[in-house]
Structures are given as C-alpha cells and as structure tokens.
Image (cartoon, rainbow, N blue to C red):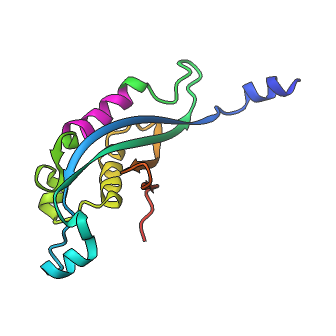
Amino acid sequence: MSSTDRQSSAVNPVVYVTRIQSFCSAHRLNSGSLDVQTNGQTYGKCNAVHGHNYKAEVTVRGAVDAITGFVVDIAILNDIIDETIMKTMDHKNIDEDVPYFRDNHIVSTAENIAVYIWKAIAERLPKSVSLDSIKLHETDKNVFVFRGEFV
C-alpha cells in the first residue's frame, strides 16, 4: 500500500479556513471605572471619538468532509460574519450601537472587540467546525489575536 493509499484510508485531514472581512467603526476609549483625568492619561488621543478601518480574519478549523470536500461552506461562514460583524459594527459607533459594549460598559479596545467577535461567531458556527482565532487589524501596525483563552 502506498503512502497516498494509507492517507486516504485514514481519518479526514484537518484544515484551517480563514475568511477576511473589512469594516469601519467609530469608538472612544473611555473607562467608567476611571476619572476624566485618568482616562485622558491612559488613552491619550484615543479618549476622543475616532474611527478605524478594521480588518477581521476569522479562522475556523475542521475535518475536510469526504463528500463535499469542504471544512465549512464559505457561504455559511460569510453569512455568520455578515450577521456578527457587518450588521452589528460596520459604520456604527461601537460604544453606542453595539449592545455588548454599551450595556456591559466594556471599553471598546481592539482586544475587547476581538473577544466580542469571537463570542458572537462561536455560538453560530456549525458543529462540524470550531473557531480557531480572531485576528483583528486595527491599523497597519496594530494587530490583535484572540484564540478563546480565558484566565
């Protein structure tokens, strides 16, 4: 038996699939737990309302289906991303328009935005795949990765 035959008779390979989506949002870094002066010192110019052209990379992992050849139907993944990112945050003020941040008084840092995207996407994914990571590009120089780890 050749190595190719052995591979085809083994369990299905696991492949990582990444979908990239860009969105534009405004926010203000400001913590309700800090006074005005400390907020200004902590967040600097980001304590004022400003915006970013974000890019989110959503990576899922799963076994390649022997029949379809897919890990996940990209159309389904795209619909999930559209619901969780585009309809929720694109051309919105994150602090005022996204209930997760507004209602829970969560500072809309890129770190917290990545966590929000993770939570929103993970609960909607088909059971055949798992969320591997959210990579959020806030600027060309600032990139944040969340892999579902909590301490």
**Percent coordinates x, y for residue 22 in the rendering:** 33, 37
- Magenta span: predominant SS is helix
Residue under the point 56% across and 21% down: 69
Q: Is residue 14 above or below residue 39?
A: above
Q: Is residue 47 above or below residue 94?
A: below
Q: Is residue 115 above or below residue 53?
A: below
Q: Looking at the figure, which quarter contains the C terminus?
A: bottom left
**Percent coordinates x, y for residue 62 in the rendering:** 53, 37
**Percent coordinates x, y for residue 143 in the rendering:** 44, 53
**Percent coordinates x, y for residue 18 in the rendering:** 48, 36
Residue under the point 52% across and 40% down: 61
Outermost residue toward the right in this view: 1
Residue under the point 43% across and 42% down: 57
Q: Looking at the figure, which quarter contains the N terminus?
A: top right
What's the magenta region? 76-87
Nearer the observer, 59 or 111:
111
Q: Is residue 102 above or below residue 89?
A: below
Q: In the rendered image, which quarter is residue 149 located in?
A: bottom left
Q: Left of 40 or right of it: where is 133? A: right
Q: Left of 111 or right of it: where is 90? A: left
Residue 33 forms part of the magenta stretch: no
